[in-house]
Image (spheres, rainbow, N blue to C red):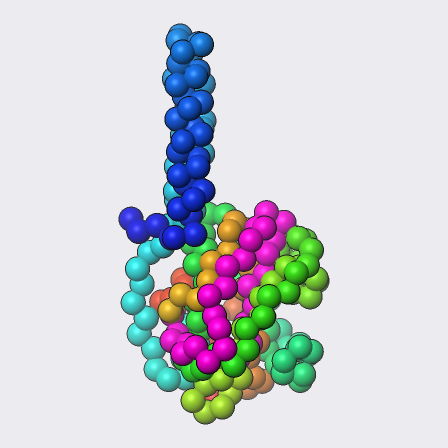
């Protein structure tokens, strides 16, 4: 299993810490030390699982919209996007639990024309105001037909660090990794009105693989 590079320091730190705890418990409580250390290694197993980075092959056409993350569709509605588009569009939001893969991937092909980090609060990621108030990033990709697609990584109540590798003028390839969010979080995508949407509220998405729509 491939692990994401964002987990390297955390995994090494936890491995050393839990090993020290295990040795100390074994030394001072020889009868119960191993048993008492078991929860730490279960936790370590969960952390390893969280930072998994599965290799996924994307098969998409020029106008395909690919799921940027694993998770559940929690918002699909017409909204006004005030930061970049400044017009009505379709908001599609996918919520991730700590059990989901947290690699974030480009949803469309094109060129990155905007990338910005916004400090903010840490409301639960499914809160209606989390898109506006939480710590987040905004990335804009302009497609070959000059359509602007806006998407955001949004921190949740548990997630306290968003990693965004996108820079202006980067080439965006649908399904290719552009960032990582540590623990529970959400990704919002803003698409033009009239976009074909192939998912509905409650659907489970597979990041980097699943087609969730198509630009017109």
Q: Against 17, is 193 above or below? A: below
Query: What residue is shown at x 44% (from left), y 9% (from top)?
Result: 29
**Residue 135: percent from left, percent from top:** 63, 59
Residue extending furthest bottom?
A: 145
Report the magenta residues as a range: 149-175
* Residue nearest the viewer, comparing 117 with 188: 117
* Residue nearest the viewer, comparing 110 with 73: 110
Q: Against 193, is 10 above or below? A: above
Residue 53 appears in view: yes
Query: What residue is shown at x 51% (from left), y 87% (from top)?
Result: 147
Query: What residue is shown at x 40% (from left), y 62% (from top)?
Result: 206
Query: What residue is shown at x 42% (from left), y 48% (from top)?
Result: 7
Q: Is residue 24 inside the magenta stretch?
A: no
**Residue 21: percent from left, percent from top:** 44, 22
**Residue 157: percent from left, percent from top:** 63, 49
**Is 74 placed left or right of 30 in the picture?**
right
**Residue 176: percent from left, percent from top:** 37, 69
Residue 177's quadrant in the figure?
Answer: bottom left
Q: Is residue 157 inside the magenta stretch?
A: yes
């Amino acid at each position: 299993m491939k692990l994401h590079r964002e987990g390297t320091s955390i995994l090494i730190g936890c491995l050393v810490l839990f090993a020290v705890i295990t040795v100390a418990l074994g030394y001072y409580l020889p009868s119960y030390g191993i048993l008492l250390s078991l929860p730490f290694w279960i936790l370590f197993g969960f952390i390893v699982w969280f930072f998994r980075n599965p290799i996924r092959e994307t098969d998409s056409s020029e106008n395909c919209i690919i799921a940027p993350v694993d998770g559940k569709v929690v918002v699909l509605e017409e909204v006004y996007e005030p930061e970049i588009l400044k017009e009505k569009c379709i908001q599609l939001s996918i919520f991730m639990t700590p059990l989901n893969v947290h690699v974030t991937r480009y949803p469309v092909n094109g060129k990155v024309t905007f990338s910005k980090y916004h400090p903010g609060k840490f409301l639960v990621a499914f809160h209606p105001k989390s898109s506006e108030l939480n710590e987040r990033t905004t990335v804009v990709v302009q497609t070959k037909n000059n359509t602007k697609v806006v998407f955001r990584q949004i921190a949740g109540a548990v997630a306290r660090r968003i990693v965004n590798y996108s820079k202006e003028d980067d080439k965006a390839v649908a399904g290719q990794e552009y960032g990582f969010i540590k623990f529970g979080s959400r990704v919002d995508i803003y698409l033009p009105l009239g976009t074909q949407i192939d998912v509905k509220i409650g659907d489970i998405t597979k990041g980097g693989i699943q087609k969730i729509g198509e630009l017109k």
